[in-house]
Amino acid sequence: MQFFNVQTVFLFYSAISIFCGLLLIGLFWGRKDTSATLWICSCFLSSLASLGSVYRDQVPVWLGYSTLVTLETIALLSLSLSLWCLIPNYNLSKGIRRALFGAACFFVLQEVLRYIGGGQLVPPMALATSSMWVFLHLFGVYSALQISKQFRTKIFFQIIAIVFFCSSLFFAMRVVNMVNGHSYYAFDPSVYNFLLYFSIALLSSFRNLVYVALRMHLGFSEHSRLNNMNLHLTNLLEEREYLLSTLSKYQKSAEVNALASTIAHEVNQPLGALKIDAQFAMYVLNENPINEALLKKTVQSFVANVNRAAEIIKNLIKLSQVLNTEPSKVSLTPLLKEVVEILRFRSQKIGIKVELNLIDDCFVLANPGQLQQVFLNLFNNALNELEHSRPHSGRISLSLHQHEDLARISLQDNGRGIAVGIENTIFELFSSNQEGGSGIGLWLSRDIIVRSGGKIWYEPASGGGANFQIELPLDRPT
């Protein structure tokens, strides 16, 4: 066998196809990439067809001419399918069915022509093969140009389209050569035939390498896009945290302002009593300084009122502080009692009865300031509702019990409840079921509870009214 002949060209193309297939396997190993998989299959099928053509006398009978050219046909169809798979949501199964049907029809045609030719390879078979490949390469041109419209960088697709078009021209030249009565034999030793197949092999090898470059470019672009998305996502998360912090401060400020007048009234009570005690003590000292029992009783009342005022002021300071956002071990029972104490005066003022059903204690891992804010918001909402719907006959029930590894808190009132149809929206931002509500409190409460590993939901109370349930995972010693 001479070195510079068509068989050598086929072997050269087969080696390049295997190399490109192995390169793509290395690039896409472990990744479910349909486009790359189809191109890899095309490389190996085309290599098999080329090797089978060179060593036709040494391969099994079933790898005859009809089978080999059908394999090359499937390889060419796979190239176009591979390009179409770069488009999201492409119906691959439909494309594969059409490709296999076309290849099967082509195989049947070859076998019919071979049967007509007495079981021998006849010129019509070679003519049909080259004509089919002209069509398939033109379809490759169409596919590459159509798909390029979906991408910003079109140069790679345009190069592939040009390669397909040039290959189709060379096969068309072979068709014209056979129609004019020249040799149909693929391994015809003429210089014209050698240059024709050498050009086709060179273009096909270049097309495979361009596809490798295309996928590397798309991979780099995708990596850059993901990096940009990650950066954008990081910025969004930072903005979200800032928004949460701002809304939390806004909500807390609104609560403090709403409670300020209420607590001022409550502080005025012990301060007024202190003034009366002080005046009475001065009177006793002036009129009957030896009455120690009366003075002692007056001083004890004085101290009790001081302690009461100090406790009220301490709770107000704790509420208004911007606390550290780091979670810590929180004792729920004292925290809930503290919330009730802060709102006790307002509850008494509007005649709302508060019922507590708390276990001795249980602990959760959360931010105590934020958790207190959740219960203050729910308690205030209940008070606002009862003040309008059932003044002087309202009832709020606050319970805490333990269920397996969860602490379950229930805050229930006997008001009107949440209107039917909006139960699923009350936790959305700027959604409020109360007139004049900001639409922040429940949304922020849910965010705090979720970030603490728990959940919060609403359900109608059995006797009418609203019932908010909260579950938080217990913090157990390890």
Image (cartoon, rainbow, N blue to C red):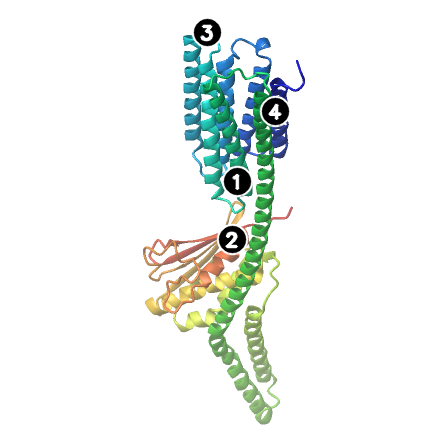
Specify whether 137 is left or right of 303: left
Is disc 4 surrounded by few (<14), some (14 to 19) or many (20+) residues within 10 Å?
many
- Of the two numbered discs 1 and 4 on the same chain, state the one appearing first in sequence: 4
- For the residues labelled 2 and 3, the Cα–Cα distance comes to 77 Å
How far apart, in angstroms, are the residues tagged by discs 4 and 2? 61 Å
- Near mark 2 (Cα within 10 A), the count class, few <14, some 14-19 or many ≥20, is some
In primary-sequence order, the first of circles 2 and 3 is: 3
Residue 286 visible, this angle: yes
Q: Residue furthest top?
A: 118
**Residue of label 2:** 450
Between disc 2 and disc 3, the foreground one is: 3
Q: How far apart are the alpha carbons under marks 4 and 3? A: 29 Å
Residue 459 coordinates in the image, percent (x, y): 38, 53
- Percent x, y of residue 412: 41, 58
The residue indicated by pointer 1 is 158
Circles 1 and 4: CB distance less than 8 Å? no
> Splitting the image into 4 quarters, where does residue 159 fall?
top right
In the structure shown, which secondary structural element does the residue marked by tag 1 occupy? Answer: helix
At 58% from the left edge and 52% from the top edge, which residue is drawn?
A: 228
Q: How many marks?
A: 4
Choose the circle earlier in sequence order: 3 or 1: 3
Please identify the quarter of the rendering in which residue 104 is found. Answer: top left
Identify the image quadrant of the N terminus.
top right
- Residue 119 is tagged as 3
